[in-house]
């Protein structure tokens, strides 16, 4: 009997193509309510999800024949990974698929912010021609601090090469990666010397609201801040305080703590005063969680994840 894989979210067609060629039966139920999914789950050996809903202990218990849970993306916070793996279910994801997209967007947002590109564009479209008021800063010669040196952090650092910057990297769980233009440092060095901070950490109990008032108050220079990780890594109200004070020169935010769990929309009931400040500030650039959302990354995620599922289910990938 061929192993069966249940797709709970839409993905690039290449994923199903690879899996079907490898001998799996792929079935989609993109709109079926979670309660109904639980009823059919015992029929499948693997599930593929992006972020439609949480795969909690109850879901995992219902998957009596599950051998693999695959997340089409990087973060795994919507899956109870520890519980799944305690039940013998492998959990895989595909950060290799969208790391290049994230690295490029982080650079693009930073350059746009430092050079007032978004504000100047809006002004010119209104017939307003201001040069001195839109004088920008060069990235060259600045010191860039990076927190987290996994797939996303390394992709961002690779793209900094050629800008003539000093790169300081802190990773609590990785050591011995310094060299080739990267300085492995403790947080205190970043607090003291960074002009730019880019955050590349997963959302966990440890990192939730890691970037808060106390954290931002430790920087000795005014900084530009980039967050392309997860919204709840950053306390928005505390960020606003520091933008108002000038201790944060500006912020590039691809993610917001007010996003719904699916990342497909903002939670309309959770748009407080700090959010209103962000949307009115020309020192903040906002995008709707699209840093890893390119046409190329869509396909690469599908390819990477299909091969990982094949490896878990002991089938050769085509």
Image: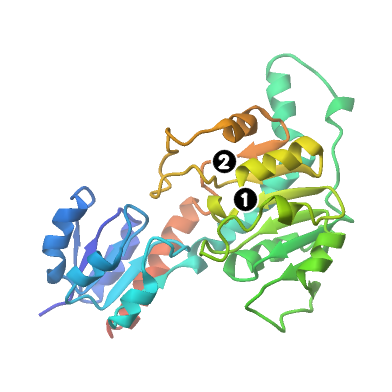
Q: Which residue is mark 1?
A: 105
Q: Residue 233 shows which numbered tag?
A: none
User: Do labels 1 and 2 touch, CB within 8 Å?
Assistant: yes
Residue found at x 74% / y 52%: 216
Classify residue 165 as left or right of residue 206. right
Query: How far apart in space, not on screen, are marks 1 and 2 (Cα)?
Result: 10 Å
Location of residue 174 with respect to 305 vertically, above or below: below
- Residue 318 shows in this picture: no
Q: Residues within 10 Å of mark 2 (few under 14, many from 20)?
A: some
Quarter of the image with the N terminus in it: bottom left
- Residue 299 shows in this picture: yes
Instruction: Name which quarter of the figure residue 128 lies in.
Output: top right
Classify residue 298 as left or right of residue 224. left
Front residue of 9 and 198: 198
Secondary element type, mark 1: helix
Residue found at x 49% / y 64%: 97
Secondary element type, mark 2: loop
Residue found at x 17% / y 58%: 37
Q: Pick out the residue farthest to the top.
A: 127
Q: Pick out the residue farthest to the front.
A: 214
- Percent across and percent down for residue 124 are 73, 20
Location of residue 117 with respect to 77 vertically, above or below: above
Q: Which residue is mark 2?
A: 287
- Percent across and percent down for residue 288 are 51, 41
- Percent across and percent down for residue 117 are 73, 34
Number of marks present in the image shown: 2
Q: Earlier in the sequence, mark 1 or mark 2?
A: 1
Classify residue 56 as left or right of residue 209. left
Residue found at x 34% / y 82%: 311
């Amino acid at each position: 009997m061929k192993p069966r894989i249940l797709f709970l979210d839409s993905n690039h067609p290449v994923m199903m193509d690879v899996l079907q060629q490898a001998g799996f039966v792929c079935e989609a139920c993109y709109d079926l309510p979670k309660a109904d999914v639980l009823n059919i789950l015992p029929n499948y050996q693997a599930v593929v999800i992006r972020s439609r809903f949480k795969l909690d202990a109850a879901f995992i218990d219902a998957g009596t024949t599950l051998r693999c849970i695959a997340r089409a993306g990087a973060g795994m916070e919507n899956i109870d990974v520890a519980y799944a793996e305690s039940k013998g279910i492998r959990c895989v994801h595909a950060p290799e698929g969208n790391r290049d997209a994230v690295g490029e967007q982080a650079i693009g947002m930073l350059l746009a912010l430092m050079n007032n590109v978004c504000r100047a564009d809006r002004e010119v479209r209104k017939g307003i021609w201001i040069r001195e008021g839109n004088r920008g800063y060069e990235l060259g010669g600045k010191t860039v601090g990076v927190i987290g040196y996994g797939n996303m952090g390394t992709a961002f650092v690779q793209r900094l090469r050629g800008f003539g910057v000093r790169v300081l990297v802190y990773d609590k769980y990785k050591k011995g990666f310094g060299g080739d233009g990267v300085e492995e440092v403790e947080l205190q060095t970043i607090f003291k010397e960074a002009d730019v901070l880019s955050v590349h950490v997963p959302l966990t109990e440890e990192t939730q609201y890691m970037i808060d008032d106390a954290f931002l108050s430790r920087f000795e220079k005014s900084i530009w801040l980039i967050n392309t990780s997860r919204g709840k890594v950053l306390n928005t109200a505390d960020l606003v305080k520091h933008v108002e004070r000038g201790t944060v020169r500006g912020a590039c935010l691809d993610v917001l703590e007010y996003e719904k769990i699916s990342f497909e929309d903002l939670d309309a009931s959770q748009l407080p005063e700090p959010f209103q400040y962000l949307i009115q500030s020309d020192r903040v650039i906002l995008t709707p969680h699209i840093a890893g959302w390119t046409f190329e990354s869509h396909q690469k995620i599908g390819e990477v994840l299909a091969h990982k599922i094949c490896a878990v289910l002991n089938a050769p990938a085509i």
